[in-house]
Amino acid sequence: MRKGTCNTCHVPDNPEKMKRLVLLQTPAHAAAEIKRMMAAVRDNRMPLDDIGIEKELDAETKALLLRFGAAFESTVNAAYAWESGD
């Protein structure tokens, strides 16, 4: 996340003054947004550059975010399934 500069914008003080601030600091925050976050990374919608235009992540960082994000998403889905008794 550091190399992807996620923690530059997705922090409680909301430096970019986003209308919908998505926090990623805790597992609970990240679990609630994992599907949207994975889609944003897959579709190159994040991160944004200094003037708010989408910029592409370097291939290594994107691959790592997608790999670890997929593992986290799988764990979140398993937890939801366990909670619902499926």
Image (cartoon, rainbow, N blue to C red):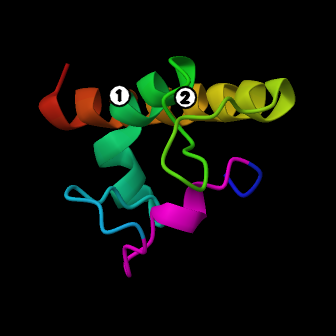
x 63%, y 34%: residue = 55
Looking at the picture, which amino acid does disc 2 mark? Answer: Val
Percent position (x, y) of residue 20?
A: 22, 55
> Which residue is the site of mark 2?
41
Q: Is residue 10 magenta?
A: yes
Q: Is residue 12 magenta?
A: yes
Q: Quadrant of the C terminus?
A: top left
> Which residue is the site of mark 1?
77
Position of residue 80 in the picture relative to residue 7 (left or right): left
Callout 2 secondary element: helix
Looking at the picture, which amino acid does disc 1 mark? Answer: Asn
Q: Which residues are magenta?
A: 4-15
x 60%, y 56%: residue = 50
Query: Disc 1 versus disc 2: distance between alpha carbons?
Result: 19 Å
Percent position (x, y) of residue 9?
A: 49, 63
Percent position (x, y) of residue 82?
A: 27, 32
Q: Is residue 63 above or below residue 4?
A: above
Question: Which tag, 1 or 2, sits closer to the chain's start?
Answer: 2
Identity of the residue furthest to the right in this view: 60
Q: Quick check: marks 1 and 2 in contact, CB under 8 Å?
A: no
Q: Is residue 30 above or below residue 67?
A: below
Q: Check disc 1: other Cα within 10 Å, few if <14, some if 14-19, many if 20+.
A: few
Q: Is residue 42 above or below residue 69?
A: above
x 48%, y 29%: residue = 45
Query: Residue 20 or 84: which is nearer the viewer?
Result: 20
Callout 1 secondary element: helix
x 72%, y 33%: residue = 57
Position of residue 79 in the picture relative to residue 83 (left or right): right
